[in-house]
Amino acid sequence: IPSSMDSSSLFSAIGTSRFKHSSIIIVSQKDGDLSMGRMAILVAARDERHLQIGLNQIYSTNFSQDSPISFPAVDYKNVLQLTPEEAYLLDGTTTNLSSLEMQDISKKYTPAHKLAMRVICQIAKIENAHRLQEVTKAHIDGCTYVGEGGRRFVRRLVELSGIDDNHPDACESFSDGTKSKPITSILAVPTTLNSISTDIRNWESLGIPAKTSHPARDVAQQYMQLGCRGDSLTCAPYLVEDFSPTEVGEHMVWGESNAVVYANSVLGARTNKTADYMDICAALIGKVPFTGVHVDEERMPLVVLDGRELFQVCATLVDSIQCNHIAFGGVDKRIMSSWDSFYSVLGYVCGNLSEGKVPLILLGLEETDRIEHWKYPILDDLKSFSAAFGTTASAPLFHIAGITPEAREDADIETMIRSIYFNDRNWRKIDMEEMRKGYEALNLGCGKNNDVTQESLLDDDKEPIKLVALGNPHLSLSECRTLNSLMSSGLKKHNNSRVIATLGRRVRSEADRLGYISTLEKFGVEFINDTCWCMLLDPPIIPLSKSDKILTNSAKHAHYGPGLTERKYRFGGLQDCINVAVLGYRRKAYTGLPTWLKRSYTTLALARRQLKFPVN
């Protein structure tokens, strides 16, 4: 393409019949060695036998509009070690297969499976994988409606699968969302769906517009017709036993960053951060490229984050400082002191400090008595940590010495430490200043739409909070139990504030059976299923005015919310959220600060210096 060709001429050329069966992807328009000042393009031909996309090859030449475009065909079998069944599914190769075996494969697989196999093999080639890895479970992140492209994609899979759009089992699974698995499933492994863009059953009462809800419902229905579980629709599939991995080392294909990080780190499963639409292709054939954290070597840490002194200081503060929160009966010390927010901020900070590497995090907990010790992280803390870590880190995995399964034994920790090349960038100390900065970024809206300065924190004025947003990721049953304890004394939320929680259907059903939902609804909590805060971006769910404040106990929501909603966010522990819901406001000064940070933060704000804490 001549360097003088403008974009309109380029797209006009792309639209000619000569390009009808090809896709043109513009890689670069900038001057440089790669494109030599011209358009660098990638030609991807769609072929029924071979997916001839050289995504790792760039064709940049000075050819005219009428010059022919050529590119090499892809022979996956020269790259991948395929089983006879995989090879037959890919391109019909019959080597080492009997006629009976070929008949069985032909009955088992549809054109949708063949398309999925070509996609997975192409991705394996791009990632330099040498074989495919079988998986046991899938969690689909591509089910969120983000435009007509994704909707057409899943519809095409349904068409290629031969599933009847009007099949009663598929429709029943969609309408009530309770069937565990449609009879018409063509998926190779049990597959759950992530949160979608609407509450399927209650979208009208919530005020979600039909133009948003209808496409979202349609996309969900198409995935359910393929065989995805209609009772899932959660960003936290690990909270439900039969959705979650059952053993350490189990290979899966999961999307959704918090779920991937939690599965790898807390449960010891193995899954990469799977791209949208690749996830359903992998679920169709039950295989993924053997790359990333599926491989033993890729799970080893490359950086140590040393927070042992920090952890001791913060825990000592909680032990020694008298909390001034509203008193609720039956709530443990860790909630009353907002210790739950410590792990959210710590995960947020560790994600930043790890710089894309898998970290080994030292907190000194390998030497802590785990029995009934309030400092030891419970699963809800690790859920918050994982979501916060996944927000700022590109790595899909972390290890915490003494806690996570691959770093629980002393010998494993020593092996990890010995494997790391030590320098100032690979052994980093987590100090109180890092935690202060992390908390401040979350509590002041990550610098976006921020109307609070360090000086204004000295102001004791009341700051109205219009919405308390809980459940990002979705609430767990134990979080519902804690909220039940916080709200069981007969208190009610303030009339000027709303409290909305998102949670999965299975968790809600169990919480309802135990009486938690009734208590929370009496307090004034509103519940939303099927979707979550990353998709609830408009009024009437969020406040109408852009100057209104939203308080959340989720580091993930506090990070993404300001940019997604153009509203102002505040961050706090679960206890702080309920206090504010009762009062309807939060003081700008230090009442919102967690106990573990309060003394340090106050000293910094008033004296502009860091307080040196004694360490026992």
Image: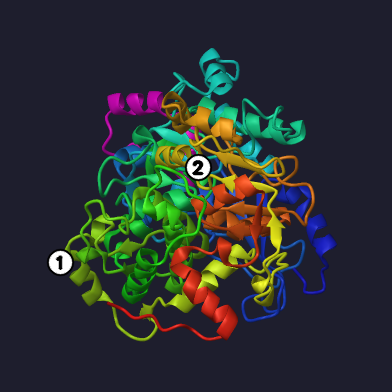
Residue 285 to residue 79: above or below: above
The amino acid beneath tag 1 is Ala
Secondary structure at numbered mark 1: helix
* Image quadrant in which the C terminus is located: bottom left
The amino acid beneath tag 2 is His
Residue 27 to residue 255: above or below: below
Q: Which residue is drawn at the image coordinates 43% and 46% (left, top)?
A: 254
Drawn side of residue 99 relative to residue 220, left or right: left
Please provide the residue range marked out in magenta.
91-119
Q: Position of residue 2 (x, y in %)?
A: 77, 72
Res 6 quadrant in image: bottom right
Res 313 quadrant in image: bottom left
Q: Position of residue 138 (x, y in %)?
A: 41, 40
- Would you say the magenta stretch is mainly helix, strand or loop? helix
Which mark, by number, is residue 300? none
* Image quadrant in which the N terminus is located: bottom right
Drawn side of residue 428 relative to residue 173, left or right: left
Q: Quick one: label 1 or label 2, which is nearer the N terminus?
A: 1
Classify mark 1: residues with Cα within 10 Å, few (<14), some (14-19) or many (20+): few
Which mark, by number, is residue 411? 1
Secondary structure at numbered mark 2: loop
User: In front here: 153 or 423?
Assistant: 423
Q: Which residue is drawn at the image coordinates 77% and 74% (left, top)?
A: 3
